[in-house]
Amino acid sequence: MKRISIFLLLVISALSISCDDFLDKQPDDMLTIDAVFTTRLEVEKYLANVYSYLPDPADPYANFTPVSDEGDFVWTTIGANSINTGNWGPTSIPYDRYAFYYKGIRAASVYINSVEKCAECEGVTPGINLRTKAEARALRAYYYFLLLRQYGPIVLLPNIIPVDASISETTKPRNSYDECVKYIVDELDLAAKDLPNVTQNVIDYGRVDKRTTLAMKSRLLLYAASPLFNGNNQDYVDFKNPDGKPLITNTYDVNKWKLAADAAKAVIDLMPNGLYKKFDATGALDPFASYRDVFIDRWNADVIWGRPSSGTNNWTVHAAPRQMKGWNGLGVTQQMIDAYHMANGKRIDEAGSGYVETGLSTADTKYTKALDWNMYLNREPRFYVSILYNHDTWVFTGASGTPIQLYATGASGKNGSHDHTETGYLLTKFVSPNSDVPNNRYTTQSWIYFRLAEMYLNYAEALNEYSPNNTDIAKYVNLVRERAGIPALPTGLTQADMRERIRHERRIELAFEEHRLFDVRRWKTADNTQGGPMYGMNVSKGTSFTDTEFYQRAIFETRVFEKKHYFWPIPQSEIDRNKQMVQNLGW
């Protein structure tokens, strides 16, 4: 059997997805399911459908960044605007993927239970049915995880829902969080047995392999060990099914951190060559190119699993300023700007950081030029990869070098363009220097779901909770910092200090990759970070680059975050349909 290229699968996956309820007894094609799984081409199409439910965070309208304190995307149609103002609920849910992922789960279950009927598939490529069955099993587990992180404890469905299923078989109570975690782990372990350690053939890049399943386990178990779910004896004591079954345990278990650490280390051990790095002409590490090109160079050494076809072209044009014929709208908050380290590895509020808040620079430096605001000088390389600020230069190598005008009357400013960033910054992470927006020529890029740097930070975080004096903690955080071009952590940190440092490192290294939204929730810190005033530069002011009025911190939005927002609400239609389903607390 000719190998199934995920590039082909994602093209085929334009298959229509109905809006029928995910627990309807079976889709119409179930009437001919035996015929579907007799023909190799139809089996390939069906597997394409299973993969098609994977999200594409490169779509700015689907990416979770503006729901966190990292960013602000300007268009009113983005669901983040409703969430950030508290104007949402069970009948109006932005980013609602509840039914969508259950459709993916159902499609995967059909495939798992049917693919071995395809004698033609097996006759052409012996063993292919077992492998693709394992892929579908892993995808089903991942869709359950995506539901779990967004909605909390969920309903685990039977492996297949018969055509003649009774109502009782399609309306079930929620499983507990720990039950969901165990089920997903067990499914990933089962899938891993029939998958290659690493996908070797370029044509197969993007397919699930064993390393993918281990990375999924790492993230899942890290979440499960975190304060929101492990020993939370305050928030969810009354969160129970109608029969009184608790949905989130209030008992702390330190062994959950060990399981998370072990899962991350299993991935690390499969990737002994370490983080992706680039070097300059002298052989010295180039931290700017190393970090930037993790997201540009496809299938590099950092990538564990990615989406071969993504909306990065769309992302790039949304991120580009009007001066570059872009849409001028992927903004970054001042909170995120302030989070980046200085070049010496210190935070801007640490003694000896060298941070200067105000004034115009007088000379060019490696990453900045004269007349840049001093706030942006001497920052770490990841800052310059990720952020476009007033007077900065657009990243395209063929750009003229003209400074970008984000002040009020500037060509990309509030009064100079019909779209503008509300924060005075634009987001350039994921943007290729070879993508030419004015001429509509873009670099083909993947979206990375899992990468090695996350595994390093997952491992360090879990190990710090389970074995706080372990030397691996600082070792793996420092490997991330080394690639980023900043010094190692100071020695002698307490467990609490190290915890805070690891969390901060995640905030920077994994910025805009949809981690922050869920990290602050699992840490139970979202109350302090996601609500209240959000800051940027004063985009209503400024008539030139040297006009200091623009460079004043200003509130662009006051956001609403309540306890109930730790989970999305279950759609009201599902509550009405399934009388055994309880709503998330507060909704």
Image (cartoon, rainbow, N blue to C red):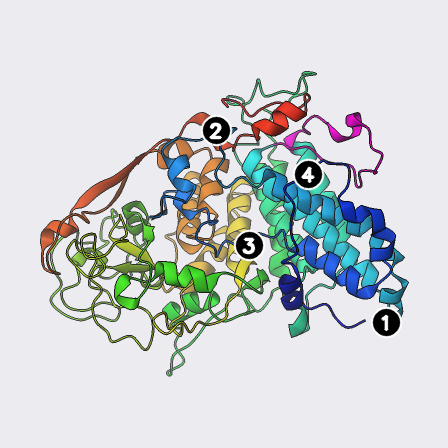
Q: CA distance from mark 1 to mark 4?
A: 34 Å
Mark 3 vs mark 1: which is more N-terminal? 1
Question: Disc 4 or 2, which lies upstream in sequence?
Answer: 4
Query: Callout 4, which amino acid?
Result: Phe
User: Which mark, residue 524?
Assistant: none
Residue position for label 2: 89
Q: Earlier in the sequence, mark 2 or mark 1?
A: 2
Image point 76% across, 55% down: which residue?
A: 134
Q: Is residue 136 visible?
A: yes
Looking at the rendered structure, the secondary structure element under dot 3 is helix
Tell me the kind of residue under disc 3.
Met
Q: Which residue is mark 1?
A: 124
Q: Residues within 10 Å of mark 3 (few under 14, many from 20)?
A: many
User: Does 169 appear in magenta?
Assistant: yes
Q: Which residue is mark 3?
A: 455
Question: Could you tell me how far apart the alpha carbons at marks 4 and 2 are, in whole angstroms?
Answer: 20 Å
Secondary-structure class at tag 1:
helix
Residue 117 coordinates in the image, percent (x, y): 89, 56
Which of 192/463 is in front? 192
Q: Is residue 231 left or right of residue 40?
A: left
Question: Which-is-in-front pick, marks 3 and 2?
Answer: 2
Q: Position of residue 94 (x, y in %)?
A: 48, 38
Distance of mark 4 from mark 3, alpha carbons? 33 Å
Left or right of residue 322: residue 62: right
